[in-house]
Image (cartoon, rainbow, N blue to C red):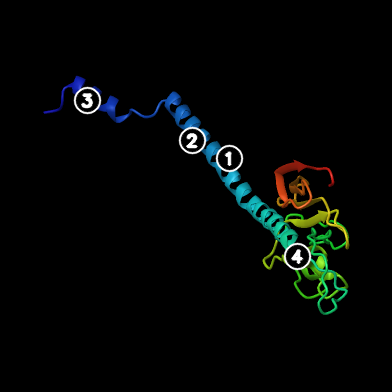
Amino acid sequence: MGLPTDVIRIRNRHKNKGFTLIELLIVVAIVGVLAVIAVVSVRRSLANAKSAEARNAVGAIGKAAARALEREVIESTGLAPGGSTAVTHRLCQTSNFVPGGASVSVPVGAKYQPNNAVGFDYHLNDGAPNGERIGWTCLKYEMTSPQSYCYHYISDAGLTSTGTYMRVRARGDLDGDGVIARFTLEGAILAVGDALCENRSKLIRQNAAW
């Protein structure tokens, strides 16, 4: 004996029921929104990770400049027994670019491995006349790991002048897209005897040169 016709129709109606077009569109829209959120989050995380090197390095170089200023400097002219001489404090003189030497050389979508042999990169002035007052040698700073940025330290100090300001710069093109990321930290001696005041740190994204 077969089932009644109305029961068969109800079963067939439930059996053939699927997703409607509207339901599918809603699902696709939700997936699309989630995908956009995920992409933005990943990009932000990658950007923060890539810029962490420059933020850390620029801060460390700024602290090295402050420590160098606190060191006592005595003119190397020699002292007679029982004699005395003035003790001064000076900022380190301007450094070379790393990489680049005499001019800026920004790693483009790549990392640069510093050459830490004497006479190169962070050790360019090691052993040179008055080298202990110049750049990275004076700052006692180096990077041993591959770096994504070009670093440069600038000051107006001279061999016999204290100097009044210093600036640290990091510049990189991590994605190789021509967009330059630049970190700058600046400090100034506000008065004679004052410690170095690191007064601003900023990140600028631009295409222009320094």
**Residue 169 percent coordinates (x, y):** 77, 52
Q: x%, y% of residue 112?
A: 74, 63
For marks 1 and 4 on the same chain, the one whose residue lies earlier in the sequence:
1
Whether residues under marks 3 and 2 lie with C-beta atoms below 8 angstroms apart, the answer is: no
Q: Is residue 35 above or below residue 160?
A: above
Q: Residue at x 45, y 31 (%)?
A: 27
Q: Amino acid at mark 2?
A: Val
> Which residue position holds label 1?
40
How far apart in space, not on screen, are marks 3 and 1 (Cα)? Answer: 52 Å
- Under circle 1, the secondary element is helix
Label 3 residue SS: helix
Q: Quadrant of residue 134?
A: bottom right
Q: Nearer the viewer, residue 179 or 36?
A: 179
Question: At numbered mark 2, what does the secondary structure look like: helix, strand or loop?
Answer: helix
Q: Earlier in the sequence, mark 3 or mark 2?
A: 3
CA–CA distance in space, label 3 to label 2:
37 Å
